[in-house]
Amino acid sequence: MRVYRDSATTLKREIYHQLRRYRPAESEADSAMAGLTALSADSTAAERAAAIRAITTSHISTAERLDHIDEFFDAVFARTGAVDTVIDVGCGVLPLLFPLDDARGAAVRQLWAVDTDKAAIAAVTAYAELRGDDRIRPFRWDLADGWDALTTQGLTRCEVGLLLKVVPVVARRNPSLLEALADTPADRLVVSGSRTAMAKKQNIERRETGVLRRFFRDFGFTEVDEFQTEDEVCFVVERR
């Protein structure tokens, strides 16, 4: 009976931390979303920046990157070069920060942004509509839906796929879907794991790196490059 109680307590704690990770305050997120959707096509750059800041700070997994977001994208594009098509799997609201309007991301014609999170995709969709340039392609999608659900929407093979902090989560929650994740339709993947556990502030870099390298080994990826940011360990890989 005690084993059952301990297991239940552990499960409840994990659920709590996951909810806290992505939804720190519903009212804060709702207010941020309202601010974004209220913007018009003639809104100023400052107004857009403020709305984006409100959205991204209300989504904790994205907020973790805010202090070093330029460093992160500098490192990514230094390794990928100019690319035409990108797919971000489990994107959250990171597409709002993607540097489409500067030299790093200027060549990106299509940024496919897919996630299971309804609120995140709603925010990305609102931002894509505000931009009005058809470069961001947001879809609410689950790995279990299969890639055909996106190819019917026009997805073709991309030059780069972003799997940011996704592999360890899938490996822990639903390892049967790792094969689908490995089949991400991109020539080169940028795959990352967390360096620190948010809830306990413990260093988990070694554990996350082990999960990532097991994924690479199991599904035939070759490591091309690696880099670190303040909160992520990142690898650039290609399928052998």
Image (cartoon, helix red, strand yellow):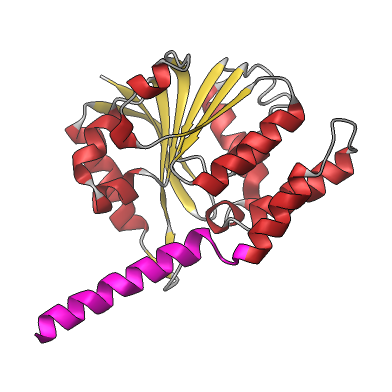
Asked where in the image residue 220 lies, by quadrant, the reply is top left
User: Which residue occupies the foreground of this view, 152 or 11?
Assistant: 152
The outermost residue toward the bottom is 2
State the quadrant of the C terminus. Answer: top left
Relative to residue 42, is residue 88 drawn left or right? left
- Write the residue at 37% across / 57% down: 205
In the rendered image, residue 121, in percent from the top left (x then y), is placed at 55, 40
Q: Locate residue 144: give its quadrant.
A: top left
Tally of marks: 0
Percent from the top left, x then y, of residue 200? Answer: 42, 73
Image quadrant holding the N terminus, namely: bottom left
The residue positioned 18% from the left and 40% from the top of the image is 176
Write down the region rendered in magenta: 1-26
Judge whether 57 appears above or below 100 on screen. below
Residue drawn 45% across the image and 64% down it: 19
The x, y position of residue 212, in whole percent, is 30, 43
| In the image, residue 183 above or below residue 50 | above
Does the rendering let one see residue 99?
Answer: no
Left or right side of 113 for 219 = left
Vertical comparison of 163 with 87: above or below = below
Asked whether residue 22 is drawn in magenta, I would say yes
The prevailing secondary structure element of the residues shown in magenta is helix
The residue that appears at 34% across and 20% down in the rendered structure is 148
- Residue 140 left/right relative to 78: left
Q: Is residue 148 magenta?
A: no
Query: Is residue 185 among the parts visible in the rendering?
Result: yes
Q: In this image, 225 relative to 40: left or right?
A: left
